[in-house]
Image (cartoon, coloured by chain):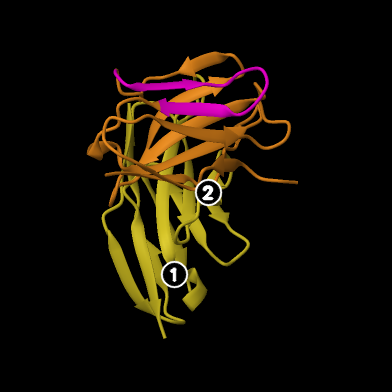
Amino acid sequence: NAGVMQNPRHLVRRRGQEARLRCSPMKGHSHVYWYRQLPEEGLKFMVYLQKENIIDESGMPKERFSAEFPKEGPSILRIQQVVRGDSAAYFCASSLWTRISYNEQFFGPGTRLTVL
Amino acid sequence: AQSVTQLDSQVPVFEEAPVELRCNYSSSVSVYLFWYVQYPNQGLQLLLKYLSGSTLVESINGFEAEFNKSQTSFHLRKPSVHISDTAEYFCAVSSTRGSQGNLIFGKGTKLSVKP
């Protein structure tokens, strides 16, 4: 039973390039969450998606960042025109969804983005 | 809105000594509480959680945490640590209402266990 998969594990981009981070949730999970971890900081919530729908994007920067979770395939976090301040570890988590109990989030190993 | 404060950024301790990692939270609504552990270059693993019921919760590897509503705390304890417990520990909260999507994390505490 594979866990949450993220790729690439490490990504290096030059300023101005685009970064695409992929997340495949655990089998059977329909909900995906993205978090960013800056150096010496805790994780900060970015966005929460279910298939083909953004549920909560209150933590997403207003510009350059977007996320999707299509009906087929992995969830994608896209960062356009990267800047050095985007260098961080980006973690994806997935969960089942039930109305009557807490939906535990399972985390992937993260993608470490370095912007040169 | 919720916030989480982990007062100690680093905690060095000798093997077999007891340890307490402190966590305080602030919230205007009821919350679920969590401790996650992160080993170097890995993702987060859930260590234990408080959802309801008994305020003392335990993990399979000897950690425990107690929810104290009056002090808004959820401190993590272990009576005797091992070298393998060296990791970063994150306290987190989530509202019991709404979409439950948003985990709020503290800044983390790096536990360093020395022989």
Same chain check for tags 1 and 2: no
The part of the image, by quadrant, that contains residue A95 is top right
Tell me the residue at 25%/34% (across/down). A83
Which chain shows up in orange? A
Q: Percent position (x, y) of residue B47?
A: 54, 54
Left-right relation of A115 to B62: left
Left-right relation of A15 to B77: left
Tell me the residue at 35%/25% (across/down). A80
The residue wearing badge 1 is: B86
The part of the image, by quadrant, that contains residue A53 is top right
Magenta span of residues: A63-78
Is the residue under label 2 in contact with that under label 1 (CB below 8 Å)? Answer: no
Front residue (pair B112, A33): A33
The residue wearing badge 2 is: A109
Q: Percent position (x, y) of residue A76?
A: 51, 27
Vertical placement of B56 versus B28: above or below?
below
Regarding residue B101, the answer to whether it shows in the image is: no
Tell me the residue at 48%/51% (across/down). B36
Q: Amino acid at mark 1?
A: Thr
Front residue (pair A34, A80): A80
Q: Amino acid at mark 2?
A: Pro
Regarding residue B58, the answer to whether it shows in the image is: yes
Does the magenta portion include A74?
Answer: yes
Vertical placement of B41 versus A43: above or below?
below
